[in-house]
Amino acid sequence: MTQVAETPPTKKEVAKSRGRRGNWLRDLIEVLLIALVLYLVIWNALQTVRVDGDSMDNTLQNQDLLLASKVSYDFGGNPSRGDIVVLIPPSDPTRDFIKRVIGVPGDVIEIDGSKTPTKMMIKPGGQGDFQTLKEPYLPETWTAMNFCCKSNGTESGSSQAVTIPPGDYFVMGDNRNRSSDSRSFGFVPRKNILAKAFLRLWPLNRFGGLGTGPSLAAGMALVPAISWLPLKRRRRRQRAPVTQRA
């Protein structure tokens, strides 16, 4: 049997082979480092939240899995009216709640349960007339804990206006008849608000955003509109002869 001697690799081939192995190892380390950095950024910026209970029906359902941003209110940002937030209730620092921001610092708020439906009234920033908060997401007629507020933001026996102190927020669940919120534990300090929920991950058939928020309707909004209508009609009457002559 004829034996064929193998030609030993040249120094150039050995160096090339080592270079390929070195490049592969360097690429792997770079990918792992990038993955680690991304993980740390995401871990510090986002969190998942599991809804427990029905206090936010129908916007959120029991066992919904949400994605919340832990940095939305950093760098000078603060919660806005309508935000759905994760917070620590002042009455129990061992738990996290998820509620909707209704009143922000400086607002004057009042809840009048003598009206049908119950009226959530706000003077934004304490200025102007009271405006009614329009909340299309409420699941049913609001009949429980529908008078507010005492000086600390909790429910009262009659309709009373109160100013939200600097650095505090008034929060409520969308399911007003079955929610433990500011009506029970009072105003929530800014430091107790941990994150802003913005996306539903589960169940998949409800994947997406968390719906529309509230809006304010000024009680005097119809006055300028009514006074404007006759003027508009007069202008039309003045233009009519010109149109006919043309």
Image (cartoon, rainbow, N blue to C red):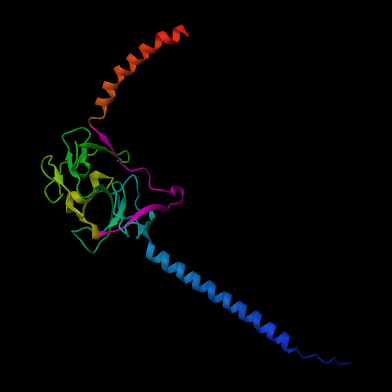
- Horizontal side, residue 207 vs residue 13: left or right: left
Q: Left or right: 96 with respect to 3?
A: left
Which residue is pictured at 26% across the width and 30% down the height? 221
Q: Nearer the viewer, residue 170 or 178?
A: 170
Q: What segment carries the magenta color? A: 192-218
- 233 versus 97 height, above or below: above
- When asked about the image quadrant of residue 133, the answer is top left
Q: What residue is rendered at 61% in x and 77% in y?
A: 24
Q: Is residue 28 above or below residue 120?
A: below
Q: Position of residue 103 (x, y in %)?
A: 23, 47
| Quadrant the N terminus occupies | bottom right
- Name the residue rendered at 22%, 42% in the picture: 124
Magenta stretch encompasses residue 204? yes
Q: Position of residue 180 (x, y in %)?
A: 22, 51
Q: Pick out the residue farthest to the right.
A: 1
Describe residue 137's horizontal placement relative to residue 90 as left or right: right
Whether 173 is drawn above or below 119: the answer is below
Q: Which of 60 and 171 lies nearest the eye of the viewer?
A: 171
Q: Position of residue 146 (x, y in %)?
A: 18, 41
Q: Is residue 225 above or below residue 134?
A: above
